[in-house]
Image (spheres, rainbow, N blue to C red):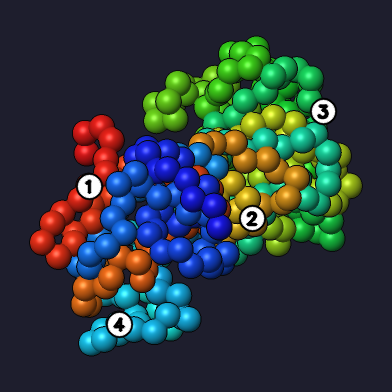
Amino acid sequence: MSTQTFTPGDTVPPTAVVGSSSSLNDDALGTDITPSGWPSSGRAKAVEVELTVTSAFTADGQVQVGVSVPGSLDPLAGFSSDAGGVFSLADGEVRGYRSGDTDAFYLDKFGGWRTEYLTFNDTGSATNKLEAAYTGLDVGEMDLRARVRQSDWDSQTAAVIAARWTGGGQGSWIWDLNGSDMRFRMKSSTVDYLNTVAISTLGLTDGEWAWVRVTWSSADRLRWWTSADGSSWTLKETDTAGGATTIDAGSADLRIGNNQSAGGVTANGFGGDIADFEMRNGSGTVIQTLSLDIMDAQADTGWTPETGNAIARGTAVTATGDTISATARVRLDLEEPVAMDDWRLIVDAQTGELTVDEIVLELSGQTLGWKVGTL
């Protein structure tokens, strides 16, 4: 096992031993990164470690901070071979693990992933969509809202923002783009009605995010809206919807970004980005949200939003966002002092990278520290 000199603030590889004066080789613990001046003698009473997520670390994984006494060591006279103790300080989702030679503290979902938006290609593939069960979403009057972006608003053909429409009489409605228009197709008493509003009327700009909205009620008919922030809306156009008075409930699931299996209606993937979606019923009550902030990893294929039914994400839908920085401090008070050459301090970032910002080691009669910056 190689030994390197540890400098506080260094990036620790996914599996590392930070702090070891033992000459014993235990490959399962990874690579030694030993602080300059790390003592080779004395008895450890406690250790405190501060960690910060850097990059490529998602909430699917965890960080382990632990101590280990290799199982082949016999305990010193009057001492146990278990170098474990009581962990404290760290917040969040945590759990402990203890084996015959290791006592560890896991920070589950340390840091995290913040999704900014999802990208849909322009195909009708079954993997190119989000889907939620229709239960509770089969409303006769509705209010649909979305934050969307297209590199070229006039280039899409039947590019679905959201829909509840499949074959076998399950059709209800489709909200999509087609060339220079935004469209809303609804099924009413088995008759299809199609209404459009010009992209130019909505004032959408290529490459820029837009809040768009379509509402339907038997009294106010079909209305098209835009907003600068998703809260204050401007009415852009009102359509008659061909005399229709209701929208069939159907039994099709809600699909966002595509309407694969469209039941005779041409459908393609959105071919752009979607950052937000919301569905309300006729009285204005929110019944389905997208809640991208609940995605806890870039590869997350399903989540339960703040409101509404669980969402399943197709594998062809790309998530864009950033890892969430986080800092945690973990303290271990050993059950009884342990000889320095009989244990290792382990920092194991199992799915990414982090920095060790500070280590404070308390020995019998002295305290040693390694740190960088202002903590």
Q: Nearer the viewer, mark 1 or mark 4?
A: 4
Q: Is residue 331 above or below residue 214?
A: below
Circle 4: element type:
loop
**Percent from the top left, x then y, of residue 355?**
40, 43
Q: Nearer the viewer, mark 4 or mark 3?
A: 4
36 or 345: which is nearer to us?
36
What whole-number distance in Å separates the C-alpha atoms at marks 3 and 2? 27 Å
What whole-number distance in Å separates the C-alpha atoms at marks 1 and 3? 63 Å
Circle 1: element type:
strand
Q: What number is the disc on residue 301?
A: 2
Q: Nearer the N terminus, badge 4 or badge 3?
A: 4
Q: Nearer the N terminus, badge 1 or badge 3?
A: 3
Q: Nearer the N terminus, badge 3 or badge 2?
A: 3
User: Which residue is labeled 4 in the image?
Assistant: 76
Q: Amino acid at mark 1?
A: Gly
What whole-number distance in Å separates the C-alpha atoms at marks 1 and 4? 26 Å
User: Which residue is labeled 3 in the image?
Assistant: 157
Quadrant where the N terminus sits is: bottom right
